[in-house]
Amino acid sequence: MASNAGAIPCLAALLLLILAASTASAAEKETRLRVYWHDVVSGGPNATVAQVAQGPSSNASATGFGTIFVIDDPLTEGPNLTGSRLLGRAQGIYVSAGKDSLSLLMAMNFVFVDGAYNGSSIAIVGPNPTERAIREMPVVGGTGVFRFARGYCQARTRWFNASTGDATVEYNVHLRHD
Ligand SMILES: *[C@@H]1O[C@H](CO)[C@@H](O)[C@H](O)[C@H]1NC(C)=O
Ligand SMILES: *[C@@H]1O[C@H](CO)[C@@H](O)[C@H](O)[C@H]1NC(C)=O
Ligand SMILES: *[C@@H]1O[C@H](CO)[C@@H](O)[C@H](O)[C@H]1NC(C)=O
Ligand SMILES: *[C@@H]1O[C@H](CO)[C@@H](O)[C@H](O)[C@H]1NC(C)=O
Ligand SMILES: *[C@@H]1O[C@H](CO)[C@@H](O)[C@H](O)[C@H]1NC(C)=O
């Protein structure tokens, strides 16, 4: 009898745990969003990319290995930088981290300043092997409506000017969050 009496509170605690777990997963939201990311290298004072460190000059530097850039890139609703709504800024750094190929380490926050996500942000940290048509990077967290975010994004270059380095990249982001 004594062992049965102990089993009941145990079972109740287990049920509570299961309930709590299912409530948490039911409350989890899923968001897919698309923004266009603009690296503006040209334009002097209007540039949104600043090189802050240069890798050692050797043959390995054909890929710019060791070079660091800080960005404050506009994120727009459509692909046209001048003709489309500014939704936020991509603020952070990218580092040329490939010795033999142009592969970047991206570490940036998408900070939203308009639209449904105004005031919220997501943090992206991951590899960007630029020779690939689609580059996938993890979303490792977020703030505001994106608290507890995790997910991934896929980046695809939509436009690139090889003479200036200016680029427009489409980011498709898939998130799960609170
Ligand atoms: C910088 O942007 C301003 C405002 O859009 C524009 O008037 C100016 O011509 C731009 N400067 C350069 C060097 O592109
Ligand atoms: C760079 O590569 C060229 C051709 O392979 C070679 O002749 C040269 O010595 C290399 N320079 C350095 C600094 O490694
Ligand atoms: C981008 O928008 C600007 C301003 O609205 C417009 O003048 C330009 O033609 C557009 N460019 C393209 C490629 O649609
Ligand atoms: C975005 O949020 C900020 C801070 O709450 C507010 O000042 C601003 O007006 C908002 N912008 C838009 C376009 O709603
Ligand atoms: C690339 O930039 C150069 C210099 O601003 C400009 O002359 C050229 O038209 C641009 N090319 C494209 C495809 O936008």
Image: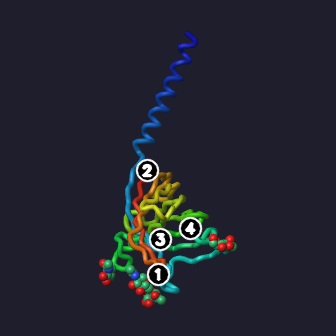
- Three-letter amino acid code of the residue under disc 2: Arg
Q: Which of 4 and 141 is in front in this view?
A: 141
The disc at residue 18 is none
x and y percent of residue 172 in the render?
40, 60
Q: Where is residue 33 in the image (x, y as percent from the top left)?
A: 38, 60
Instruction: Say whether disc 4 or disc 2 marks the residue closer to the N-terminus.
Output: 4
Q: Where is residue 58 in the image (x, y as percent from the top left)?
A: 67, 72
Of badges 1 and 4, nearer the viewer stands 1
Residue at mark 2:
176
Disc 4 element: strand
Q: Position of residue 23 (x, y in %)?
A: 43, 39
Whichever of labels 4 and 3 marks the residue nearer the N terminus, that label is 3
Q: Is residue 107 visible?
A: no
Going from N to C along the chain, the mark reached first, 1 or 4, is 4
**How much space separates mark 2 and mark 3, taking CA atoms?**
21 Å
* Residue under label 4: 94
The secondary structure type at the circle numbered 2 is: strand
Q: Earlier in the sequence, mark 2 or mark 3?
A: 3
**Amino acid type of the residue that numbered disc 3 sits on in the rendered structure:** Arg
Q: Nearer the viewer, residue 121 or 96?
A: 96
Question: Looking at the image, which residue is at 44% across and 34% down?
Answer: 19
User: Of tags 3 and 1, which is closer to the observer?
Assistant: 1
Which residue in the protein does label 1 denote? 163
